[in-house]
Image (cartoon, helix red, strand yellow):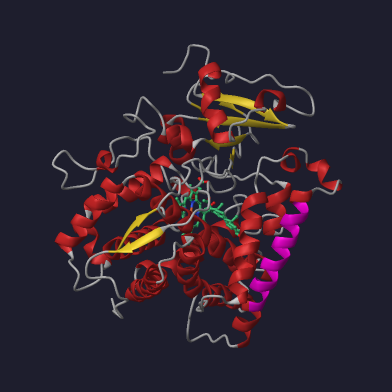
Amino acid sequence: VRTPHGPQEPPHLPALPLIGSLLSLRSPHAPHVLFKELQKKYGQTYSLMMGSHRVLIVNQHVHAKEVLLKRGKVFAGRPRTVTTDILTRDGKDIAFGDYSVAWRFHRKIVHGALCMFGEGSASLERIICAEAQSLCNTMSEAAAAGLALDLSPELTRAVTNVVCSLCFNSSYCRGDPEFEAMLRYSQGIVDTVAKDSLVDIFPWLQIFPNADLRLLKQCVAIRDRLLQKKYEEHKADYSDHVQRDLLDALLRAKRSAENNNTAEISAESAGLSDDHLLMTVGDIFGAGVETTTTVLKWAVTYLIHHPEVQRRIQEELDTKIGVDRSPLLSDRGSLPYLEATIREVLRIRPVAPLFIPHVALSDTSIGDFKVRKGTRVIINLWSLHHDEEEWDKPELFDPGRFLNSEGTGLTVPSASYLPFGAGIRVCLGEALAKMELFLFLSWILQRFTLSVPPNHPLPSLEGKFGVVLQPVKYKVKATPRPGWDRPKDQAC
Ligand code: HEM
Ligand code: PLO
């Protein structure tokens, strides 16, 4: 309901020149938790200053949907920050790139390529199942040797190989030095990029050497060499007649734009420089690896805390699939409790608790509040997914909340649930990620029961905040289930 006076200024945190609202933001809590807390004092939607930038924090789903859906196009901008500019050669990618013709064009190419090589094709299912088989074999070997395993690099390699086939038509073996280098640089980037660090608040601070910035630059340089190598290899044996992967799809778009001189295509070709192609493929590779791996790690962490949830998923797997074959994507409909568990993991520990900031491209409003052009909008997904008005005991891990009352079908019990975002900036990898989460978790839980080794503490449920919210490292004991004590060489 509009007030009689029209849109108002939103409540504002105290701000000083240059440092903005920094003094009110000092807190031992991670930003998503602090922004949720600040609601108590300032209301669900409030603004603050980060250095000289006006930032609006949205903690509630009706306002979040106004930003993402109702006025999605107005809020489709992205801010330029020092760290994301380093990662993306000044925003020449999709995720951190501002709204533009080039951005739209790259999203379209990636979407088409993901449909062609991914979601629409049976070959992706085969690739994921082959990686699941190899992951389960490694877990079996560790179990046979009586060893507990840090699952993190194993899950990362499985997920990396899926996205590597999609992007580059290649994969990594265990211990491959290029893969080890990738693990290191990617963690360095996750730890430093887009962090609300001082460098992103005060662009002028970048003239002072800063440890985070140095690490980021080193990691980005290593990533860029790897991307460049893949690019050169693809250019060397590119053919117009076969499209092996996303990089071929991008090269094809570039060649066809270069061979075409119509006004429309040449505008598009502005977004088809080598830099743009490399940054787009870097985004998909980076997002493809870090997000899905993080969710798998959270799923394992919560399953270890909740053996009763594991048991119920395993009962479902035993009844619907048995031990004579492995799960297939076509089993998704008959394993609702596993699907509900995946939904609950995505709720309770959202991968990107603050999304990526949006920017208002013109003067506009949210609810009754005025929003000026250029305002950065942070959607606090953490608040949406832990809203006490929307969720019963939000801190409780309960997959049952996503089941209907008979426990036979899936529901979404609240509109305050947006793990992949919505609207024109919605995640490009949602379908791929869901396929991977289902297949990897169903294969693992069909074969193993997961726990911590005897006398080890349960892993922490508190995440490490960065551009993605990651769980901490710990060792897992995987006990083979009856019928799975030796690796079976099974095709899916
Ligand atoms: C953006 C979630 C997996 C590619 C996003 C956003 C979220 C998200 C919340 C931000 C939306 C916004 O700023 O409004 C997730 C989750 C994943 C996942 C929870 C796994 C479970 C993936 C995968 C890929 C991917 C596998 C690649 C294949 C992207 C890209 C964007 C994005 C390119 C930027 C879109 C844009 O700005 O136009 N994702 N994502 N994501 N995601 Fe994902
Ligand atoms: C992860 C580290 C990689 O080395 C580079 C990279 C590229 C794309 C980023 C991704 C990182 C983190 C997760 C992001 C993704 C784009 C969309 C996705 C931010 C930084 C999400 C969840 O929004």
Q: Picture quarter containing residue 413? A: top left
- Which secondary structure dominates the residues rendered in magenta? helix
In the picture provided, is 22 more to the left or to the right than 131?
right
Viewer-nearest residue: 490 or 17: 490
Quadrant occupied by the C terminus = bottom left
In the picture provided, is 441 more to the left or to the right than 411?
right
Where residue 444 appears, as percent x and y from the top left, is 33, 63
Total marks in image: 0
- The magenta-colored residue range is 213-229
Quadrant occupied by the N terminus = top left
In the image, farthest residue toward the front: 455
- Does residue 135 lie above or below 7 as drawn? below
Where residue 193 appears, as percent x and y from the top left, is 66, 50
In the picture provided, is 199 more to the left or to the right than 426?
right
Residue 117 falls within the magenta-colored stretch: no
Viewer-nearest residue: 216 or 139: 139
User: Which residue: 40% across, 46% down?
Assistant: 346
Residue 364 appears in the rendering: no
Q: Picture quarter containing residue 223? A: bottom right
User: Which residue: 26% across, 68% down?
Assistant: 328
Residue 225 falls within the magenta-colored stretch: yes
Where residue 291 appears, as percent x and y from the top left, is 49, 55
- Does residue 172 lie above or below 337 as drawn? below
Where residue 423 appears, as percent x and y from the top left, is 44, 46
Residue 227 appears in the rendering: yes
In the picture provided, is 312 more to the left or to the right than 51?
left
Viewer-nearest residue: 269 or 479: 479
User: Which residue: 67% across, 71% down?
Assistant: 274
In the image, farthest residue toward the top: 4
- Does residue 15 lie above or below 423 as drawn? above
Q: Picture quarter containing residue 11? A: top right
